[in-house]
Each structure stands twice: as C-alpha cells, then as structure tokens.
Amino acid sequence: MLQSVAPLTNQADPLNAIRGVDTSNKSAVREAAEEFEAVFLNTMLQNMFTGLNEGGTWGGGTGSDAWQDLLIDEYARSISKAGGIGLADSVERELIALQEGAL
C-alpha cells in the first residue's frame, strides 16, 4: 500500500532563489531561474529517494545520509544546467515580464 510522503523540512524554499534578483541583468535572471529549477528538482529527487532501504548507491554506513543529500543536490544542479525540465525558461520569462511591467 502506498504511504504519503511528508515534505522534508530542511530543504530550501525555491522562491529564495529568485528573491531580490536584479531583473535588468539578463545573466542574473537566467542564473536565478536555473537556481530555482535546481532547488525544485532537488525537492523532487529527495522525495523520490525517501523510504529506500539502506544500501545501494548510498551504502549503509555512517554519513550515508549526508552523501545522499550531496549527490542528489549535484544531480539537481547538473540537470538544471543541462537544460533541465523547462522550468528555468518559464521562470526567466516571468521575471523579465515582471521587470517590463514595473517600468
């Protein structure tokens, strides 16, 4: 039977990645959008690996949780930098639209 998965509380808020970004700087906007996507992907991947038995890629020894978190974070950043799932493109468009609307 499927069990509901509680969200992890130690994860960053994806909105922190886009707060205070200088929308007039296009490279900063793109970087913030990719960071937002990376945090979102990290959350998705963390939930995907929740509840797995010990062993496998992470091992079962001391510190395996830390290594799992680090590897999942790197997966998320790599996916985002390689084009991601299209979320960064949407966030970038919205940030630019917000900047244009504020003029």
Image: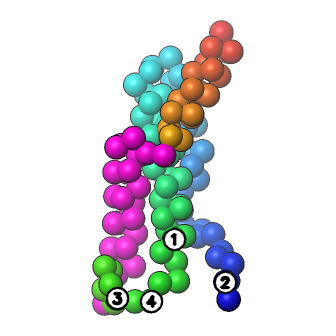
The range drawn in magenta is: 61-85
**Which residue was labeled with disc 3?**
55
Report the Cα–Cα distance between label 2 and label 1: 13 Å
Spatial distance from mark 4 to mark 2, Cα to Cα? Answer: 15 Å
Image vertical order of residue 28 relative to residue 84, above or below: above
Element type at marker 1? helix
Residue denoted by label 1: 48
**Of the image marks 3 and 2, the number of the one nearer the N terminus:** 2
Determine whether, in the image, residue 58 is placed left or right of residue 88: left
> Which amino acid type is shown beneath numbered disc 1?
Met
Callout 1: 10 Å neighbours few (<14), some, many (20+)? Answer: few
Where disc 3 sits, the SS reads loop
Q: Mark 2 vs mark 1: give the one in front.
A: 2
> Which is more toward the observer, 61 or 94?
94
Q: Amino acid type of disc 4?
A: Asn
Q: Write down the residue under mark 2.
A: 2
Q: Amino acid at mark 2?
A: Leu
Q: CA distance from mark 3 to mark 1?
A: 16 Å
What residue sits 61% from the left and 28% below the top?
A: 94
Q: Nearer the viewer, residue 73 or 80?
A: 80
Question: CA gap, disc 4 to disc 1?
Answer: 13 Å
Write down the quadrant of residue 98 in the picture.
top right
Q: Position of residue 22 (x, y in %)?
A: 51, 24
Whether residue 21 can be seen here: no
User: The residue under label 3 is which amino acid type?
Assistant: Gly
- Residue, disc 4: 53
The residue that appears at 57% across and 26% down in the rendered structure is 93
